[in-house]
Amino acid sequence: MLKHIVMWKLKDHAEGADRAANAIEMKRRLDACASIVPGILSFEVRLAQAGLEATCDIVLYAQFADKAALDAYASHPTHEAVKPFIGAVRAERHCMDYEV
């Protein structure tokens, strides 16, 4: 099994919206990717919550059956369609994949 964790810090303003609105839109778009290929075992997108520590605005935590499933997800047209928006609104991106 492969775990895939991605965290983003968003720009204060981008694409005609503020950080909070872009975080909600980004979550909506990522949530649409939750079951696009076989081998996605779990898929969770969360926004930073007021009152709890967070150095990023949004996080994706997903588990894939194997690297082939992650690769299929990464290159799927639905996921590819999300990338331009994320690229436009993000200030920073951090990612870690690891096998368990």
Image: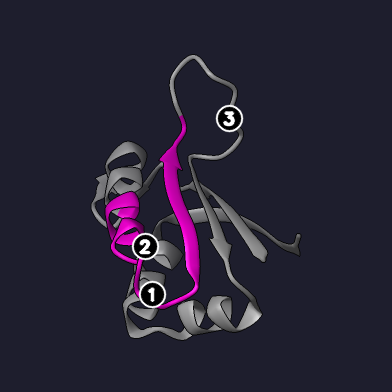
Disc with the residue nearer the chain's start (1 vs 2): 2
What residue is shown with label 2? 34
> Is mark 2 in CB contact (under 8 Å) with mark 3?
no
- The label on residue 12 is none
At a point 43% along the width and 77% down the height, the residue shown is 38
At a point 44% along the width and 49% down the height, the residue shown is 44
Q: Which residues are magenta?
A: 26-48
Q: Is residue 16 left or right of residue 45?
A: left
Label 3: element kind: loop
What residue is shown with label 3? 54
Q: Position of residue 42 (x, y in %)?
A: 48, 56
At a point 32% along the width and 56% down the height, the residue shown is 31
Question: Gap between marks 3 and 1, in whole Å?
Answer: 25 Å
Q: Position of residue 48 (x, y in %)?
A: 47, 32
88 versus 58 height, above or below: below
Q: Residues within 10 Å of mark 1 (few under 14, many from 20)?
A: some
Disc with the residue nearer the chain's start (3 vs 1): 3
Of 42 and 20, the residue lying toward us? 42
Of 19 and 47, the residue lying toward us? 47
Is residue 27 located in the magenta-colored stretch of the structure?
yes
Label 2: element kind: loop
- Residue 77, by quadrant, is bottom left
What residue is shown with label 1? 79
Label 1: element kind: helix
14 versus 35 height, above or below: above
* 1 vs 2, front mark: 2
Looking at the picture, which amino acid does disc 3 mark?
A: Ala
> Is mark 3 in CB contact (under 8 Å) with mark 1?
no
Question: Gap between marks 2 and 3, in whole Å?
Answer: 23 Å
* 2 vs 3, front mark: 2
